[in-house]
């Protein structure tokens, strides 16, 4: 394995298997709970994630694909929620982001773009302040398809409106800023799981 970092009760690391090559994995400390998050470089051997950095409940890192080269990615710990943030050197060239540091509402990093060369870049990371439950996919709190503005994180103000087709079940320890439950709506927290509100 390569880079590793902890987020809440999960360890994220760069693991290597014969089938996937070097990719992003996560573990809850058990054999069954040690799984690949996403096979990012499906058309080449490995994406080789490095510089794993946790900001709130999101993981940012440098990974490479045959199509985009080495660029900035982020992950909420799910396959669907592991996405390319920015392709600073379009095409197969790499911007190779490194030295990822959070300051205020921004993530700063050094990257090499075609226009500017190697410089400091920043992205806004706290824009996701409010997200509403839709229940469009399932009862899974941790599925982005069930939310209007992404899976809630530690900065999120969460609203559970009434009249939804189904309501959320929280199955892992979760930290959010604020929770508003409308009359007739509900949230179920599984046994031995904690929901923490910071506001």
Image (cartoon, grey):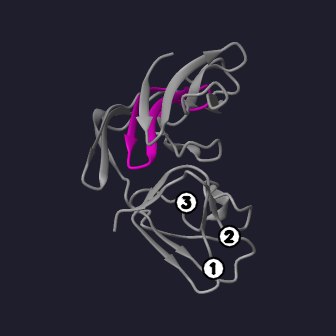
Picture coordinates of residue 111, whole percent (x, y): 35, 33
The residue located at (56%, 30%) in the rendering is 27
Picture coordinates of residue 105, whole percent (x, y): 29, 56
Label 2 and label 3: CA atoms lie apart by: 16 Å
> Label 3's element?
loop
Instruction: Provide the residue designation for mark 1.
Output: 185
Instruction: Please identify the quadrant where the C terminus is shown.
Output: bottom left
Task: Single out the residue that lies furthest toward the left.
Answer: 103
Above or below 35: residue 178: below
How busy is the neighbourhood of tag 2: few (under 14 within 10 Å), some, or many (20 plus)? many
Instruction: Provide the residue designation for mark 3.
Output: 150
Instruction: Provide the residue designation for mark 2.
Output: 167
Q: Is residue 50 magenta?
A: yes
Q: Which residues are magenta?
A: 49-71
Please indicate, yes or no, whether residue 186 appears anywhere in the rendered image: yes
> Label 2's element?
loop
Please indicate, yes or no, whether residue 40 appears anywhere in the rendered image: no
The residue located at (56%, 42%) in the rendering is 77
């Amino acid at each position: 394995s390569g880079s590793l970092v902890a987020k809440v009760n999960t360890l994220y690391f760069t693991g290597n298997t014969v089938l996937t090559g070097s990719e992003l994995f996560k573990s809850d400390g058990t054999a069954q709970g040690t799984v690949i998050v996403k096979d990012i470089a499906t058309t080449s051997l490995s994406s080789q994630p490095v510089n794993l950095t946790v900001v709130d409940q999101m993981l940012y890192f440098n990974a490479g694909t045959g199509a985009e080269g080495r660029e900035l990615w982020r992950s909420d710990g799910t396959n669907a929620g592991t996405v390319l943030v920015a392709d600073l050197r379009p095409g197969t060239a790499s911007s190779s982001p490194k030295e990822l540091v959070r300051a205020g509402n921004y993530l700063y990093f050094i990257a090499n773009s075609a226009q500017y060369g190697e410089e400091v870049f920043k992205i806004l990371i706290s824009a996701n302040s409010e997200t509403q439950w839709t229940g469009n996919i399932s009862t899974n709190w941790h599925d982005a398809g069930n939310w209007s503005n992404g899976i809630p994180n530690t900065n999120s103000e969460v609203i559970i409106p009434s009249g939804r087709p189904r309501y959320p079940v929280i199955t892992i320890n979760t930290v959010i800023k604020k929770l508003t439950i409308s009359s007739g709506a509900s949230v179920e927290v599984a046994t031995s799981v904690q929901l923490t509100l910071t506001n």
